[in-house]
């Protein structure tokens, strides 16, 4: 997986990207990051890349020329890449989208600043508009990093245990079950007996049920699209009846 990011602040992205799991994955050449400084493509001697908006209004708008030239500089390397523009107006990012993007070989992230980017270049190069939530940030760098982390960890080999990526929160549209480690007793609370039993079937059943319980309690909106067996659907219905008593 090759990530390309068009940004005014490449150091902000590179410093954060090259830590923890992403750093190890990059060292193994499982993923890569190329940060392109849009300012390098300014035609202004002061490296200015923004100007006043036509029609008036507050703030400045990023000019189309430098953005397009930055994109052109990596287009051949990133053949067939989807161009993801980080904007509050985009579709809200979720785990299903992460799984979809993880199937790509190359992804380009476009980070705006100020009041945004000239619409003409967006219409020409952007394939996906994505938001990480209904709030406004200073620029697209942090949302891009969030997406790269979520996508990158789904690339085979990135996690030490690939099963981890399959059973974490939002797998089958369910939240993850509770996790425990040593010691067995902490503040008079014990690790559930089933997890110490060594019976893998019972452990798996308990974990699935706990995921359903937790999702019903914390994110019931997810259950409409949850992938449940017939028995699990019955378990959920029983839970709802109990809660309504």
Image (tube, grey):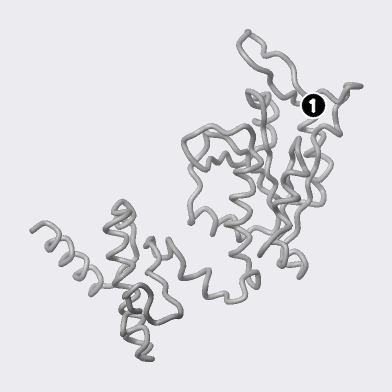
**Residue at (77%, 33%) from the top-left corner?**
68
Q: Residue furthest top?
A: 55
Disc 1 crowd rating (10 Å Cα; few below 14, some 14-19, many 20+) is some
Quarter of the picture containing the N terminus is: bottom right
Quarter of the picture containing the C terminus is: bottom left
User: Quick one: 186 or 30, which is closer to the camera?
Assistant: 186
Q: Position of residue 117 (x, y in %)?
A: 67, 27
In this image, 160 relative to 7: left or right? left
User: Quick one: 12 or 228, which is closer to the camera?
Assistant: 12
Quarter assignment of residue 195:
bottom left
Q: Position of residue 239 (x, y in %)?
A: 18, 65
Q: State the residue position of label 1.
A: 65
Task: Name the secondary structure under disc 1.
Answer: helix
Q: Number of labelled discs?
A: 1
**Residue at (31%, 51%) from the top-left corner?**
221
Q: Position of residue 84 (x, y in %)?
A: 63, 43
In this image, 142 relative to 24: left or right? left
Q: Is the residue 176 above or below the residue 109 in the image?
A: below
Q: Is the residue 149 above or below the residue 119 in the image?
A: below
Quarter assignment of residue 228:
bottom left
In this image, 39 relative to 57: left or right? right
In this image, 173 relative to 87: left or right? left
**Residue at (37%, 79%) from the top-left corner?**
185
Q: Residue furthest left?
A: 245
């Amino acid at each position: 997986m090759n990530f390309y990011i068009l940004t005014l602040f490449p150091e902000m992205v590179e410093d954060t990207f090259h830590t923890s799991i992403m750093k190890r994955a990059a060292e193994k050449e499982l993923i890569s990051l190329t940060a392109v400084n849009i300012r390098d493509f300014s035609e202004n001697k002061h490296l200015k890349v923004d100007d006043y908006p036509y029609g008036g209004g507050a703030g400045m708008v990023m000019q189309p020329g430098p953005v397009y030239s930055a994109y052109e500089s990596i287009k051949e390397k990133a053949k067939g890449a989807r161009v993801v523009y980080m904007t509050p107006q985009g579709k809200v990012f979720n785990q299903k989208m992460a799984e979809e993007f993880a199937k790509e070989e190359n992804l380009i992230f476009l980070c705006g600043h100020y009041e945004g980017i000239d619409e003409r270049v967006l219409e020409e190069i952007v394939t996906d508009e994505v938001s990480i939530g209904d709030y406004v940030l200073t620029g697209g760098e942090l949302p891009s990093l969030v997406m790269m982390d979520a996508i990158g960890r789904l690339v085979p080999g990135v996690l030490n245990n690939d099963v981890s990526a399959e059973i974490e929160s939002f797998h089958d549209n369910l939240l993850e079950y509770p996790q425990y480690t040593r010691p067995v007793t902490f503040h008079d609370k014990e690790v559930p007996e089933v997890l110490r039993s060594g019976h893998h079937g019972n452990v798996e059943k308990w974990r699935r049920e706990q995921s359903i319980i937790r999702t019903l309690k914390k994110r019931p909106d997810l259950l409409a699209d949850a992938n449940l067996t017939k028995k699990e659907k019955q378990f959920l219905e029983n839970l709802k009846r109990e809660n309504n008593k």
